[in-house]
Image (tube, rainbow, N blue to C red):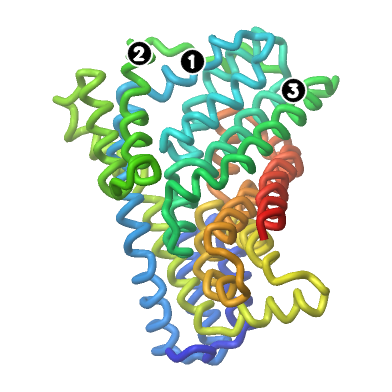
Amino acid sequence: MTPATVSSLGALAGLVFAIVMIIFNAPPFYGLVVGALLGGILGGGGLDATVAAMVSGIQGMTRPILLILTSGVLIGAMIRTGSTEKLAESIIKAFGTKRALFAIAFAAALLCVAGVFVDIALIAVAPVALAVGRRANLNKESVALAMLGGGKAGNLISPNPSTIATAEAFNVDLTSLMGNSLLPALAALLMTILLARYLAKRKDGLPVRLTDVEESSATLPTLVEAAFGPAVTLFLLTLRPLCGISVDPIVALPVGGLACLLATRRVHEAVETTKYGLSRVSGVAILFIGTGTIAGVVSATTLEQDFVRILHALHIHAFMLAPLSGALFSCATASTTAGATLASQTFAGTLADQGVAPLAAATMTNAGATTFNSFPHGSFFLATADATYMSFGKRTRLIPYEALVGATSAAVATALYLLNA
């Protein structure tokens, strides 16, 4: 398929159809594939050319998918050895009940920084967070928002799927993107604490019930053992900016997982652990394939130029494509990963043509993608509602607060670009 052979309206219609399918509980992968196929055909691309564009889009996702799959070694090791639970428990206990909300947010952020997917990190934090929330007499909304916002903040400065995909699309170093996102992440964490404290003061909050609190009977590793694996991964990733030695994340992530098994004396469980880790990341890898089909069809449109023209007509500078596209696509897909990937794949070239530095553009796009990632048609919403024992209605009420946390990080990332432009 040659460039601009599909109309932008056709591609957007396909994306809307994919959203509707996902809302009605269709598997996101199939929703995205069908949406991409429909969008290409409605946009005038023809069946053969549309399929070719979809395949081309998937090919562009090959490296991010490989990164996701290899990260399963670290994730599986962290979960199976109890390291995630130990890290969360230690952080929350260290700060005590008086600083419970900060401790919960910080624990969620740190697990994400360690390379654990945000959904899994929050599921791991939830039992300990609810127990602390009950002791501190906090309502469930404040506890849940502390977890959710902390996860958003940590996701920005971690080797997580959205950060990996954004770095790859903009062709910037992953460690550089993580470092450049530090201030936006800290701003998101601060906003999380302020909003969680506000919710804690509400009289109509849902109390944490005794049945919500789960006590683990498993023998957990020591704090040093639990932190060893992610520490090795982060050390390897920082060798490039520190001393010019480049260790690819494809290597650093599984090495950290093996280090975790070694530190916790669970090397004999390596086969079972890697199988488990692969099962936890395969869904994300499959989502990337579906996202690639949409990205391939979108790349055959003039959507980038159309967005630029709209921004110019509204007297908005083209650099705003970065945070706005991240936010809009995360809203459409209810996923930080899919949103950041689609926005990056679609607008990386356009932003470069407009003179926006790749690292700054990547930072703004990734931050923007954390804004609307928790809409009800996404897995993040369902996973976190289940982990915190919140009803659909109660969980939905947190979405505006989560959006404000994401918007804060996007605003700070944009302000930093303006200051350095």
Q: Which amino acid does label 3 sit on?
A: Leu
Quick check: 62 above or below 82?
A: below
Near mark 1 (Cα within 10 A), the count class, few <14, some 14-19 or many ≥20, is many
Residue 43 percent location from the top left of the image: 57, 87
Q: Is 74 or 237 nearer to us in this picture?
A: 237
Callout 3: SS: loop
Quadrant for the C terminus in the image: bottom right
Circle nearer the N terminus (2, 1)? 1
- Res. 23 visible in picture: no
Near mark 3 (Cα within 10 A), the count class, few <14, some 14-19 or many ≥20, is some
Residue 408 percent location from the top left of the image: 72, 44
Circle nearer the N terminus (2, 3)? 3
Quadrant for the N terminus in the image: bottom left
Q: Is 226 or 168 nearer to us in this picture?
A: 168
Mark 2 near mark 1, Cβ–Cβ under 8 Å? yes
Q: Is 362 or 399 nearer to us in this picture?
A: 362
Quick check: 102 above or below 355?
A: above
Mark 1 near mark 3, Cβ–Cβ under 8 Å? no
Instruction: Specify the farthest residue to the right.
Output: 203
State the separation of the CA atoms marked 2 and 1: 10 Å
Q: Which of pointers 1 and 3 indicates the residue nearer the eye?
A: 1
Q: Is 34 or 44 nearer to us in this picture?
A: 44
Callout 2: SS: loop
Residue occupied by mark 3? 206
Q: Which of pointers 2 and 3 indicates the residue nearer the eye?
A: 2
Near mark 2 (Cα within 10 A), the count class, few <14, some 14-19 or many ≥20, is some
Q: Which mark is residue 89?
A: 1
Callout 1: SS: helix
Residue occupied by mark 2? 220
Mark 2 near mark 3, Cβ–Cβ under 8 Å? no
Instruction: Specify the farthest residue to the front.
Output: 243
